[in-house]
Each structure stands twice: as structure tokens, then as C-alpha cells.
């Protein structure tokens, strides 16, 4: 199992969910449907909060690749 680091802003526990979504393609017309992985913070007061229904999500990390989204979340600049 891949371990997520705590939130870089508030140090709360990170949350990862997956969902089948329609997303707009960057720079192209149309949309794409697929399984996406989302990672964010579990604290509703944090800017990186990840709502379970993805309704009130402000800033999140998402990708079709679970490993990629975990690497992006766990990356820290020293």
C-alpha cells in the first residue's frame, strides 16, 4: 500500500479517492471520461481539502495514474 504524506499546509491526514468523471481536455475541444484518482486534505478548513463528493473541492491533485498522483502529493521542496 502506498503511504501518503500529511498535508503540507496543515499537517492533517491526506485522503485519496477515485471516481469516474468527465473532464475537459486541456487545449482541446470536447471532454474525456475515465477513472481519475484524487488526493487532498481531510480538513475542511484547509485550502487542499478534498470533499468526498468532489463538490467543494478547491485545489486538488488528480490523474488517471494512481502512482503519479501519489508522487505529486508526496513531493516536497526542501
Image (cartoon, rainbow, N blue to C red):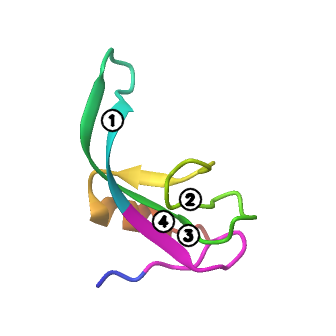
Instruction: Say which mark, if any, is on residue 73.
Output: 4
Instruction: Say which mark, if any, is on residue 50.
Output: none
Circle 1 crowding by C-alpha within 10 Å: few under 14, some 14–19, many from 20: few
Residue at the right extreme, as displayed: 45
Instruction: Say which mark, if any, is on residue 22.
Output: 1
Q: Residue at x 50, y 61 (%)?
A: 52
3D distance between C-alphas at marks 3 and 2: 23 Å
Sooner in the amino-acid sequence: mark 4 or mark 1: 1
For the C terminus, the image quarter is bottom right
Verify whether residue 5 appears in magenta.
yes
3D distance between C-alphas at marks 3 and 4: 8 Å
Verify whether residue 24 appears in magenta.
no
Q: Are marks 4 and 2 in contact (CB under 8 Å)?
A: no
Residue 69, x across and y down, in percent: 38, 60
> As displayed, is residue 15 above or below residue 66?
below
Find disc 3 in the rendering and name its residue: 76
Sooner in the amino-acid sequence: mark 3 or mark 2: 2
Give, as a single range, the part of the protein colored magenta. Answer: 4-17
Sooner in the amino-acid sequence: mark 2 or mark 1: 1
> As displayed, is residue 27 above or below residue 43?
above
Find disc 2 in the rendering and name its residue: 51
SS for tag 3? Answer: loop
> As displayed, is residue 35 above or below residue 39?
above
3D distance between C-alphas at marks 1 and 3: 30 Å
Amino acid at each position: 500500500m502506498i503511504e501518503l504524506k500529511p498535508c503540507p499546509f496543515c499537517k492533517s491526514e491526506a485522503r485519496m479517492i477515485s471516481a469516474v468523471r468527465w473532464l475537459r481536455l486541456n487545449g482541446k475541444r470536447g471532454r474525456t471520461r475515465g477513472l481519475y484518482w484524487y488526493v487532498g486534505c481531510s480538513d475542511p478548513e484547509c485550502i487542499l481539502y478534498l470533499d468526498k463528493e468532489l463538490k467543494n473541492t478547491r485545489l486538488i491533485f488528480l490523474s488517471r495514474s494512481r502512482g503519479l498522483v501519489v508522487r505529486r502529493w508526496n513531493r516536497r521542496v526542501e
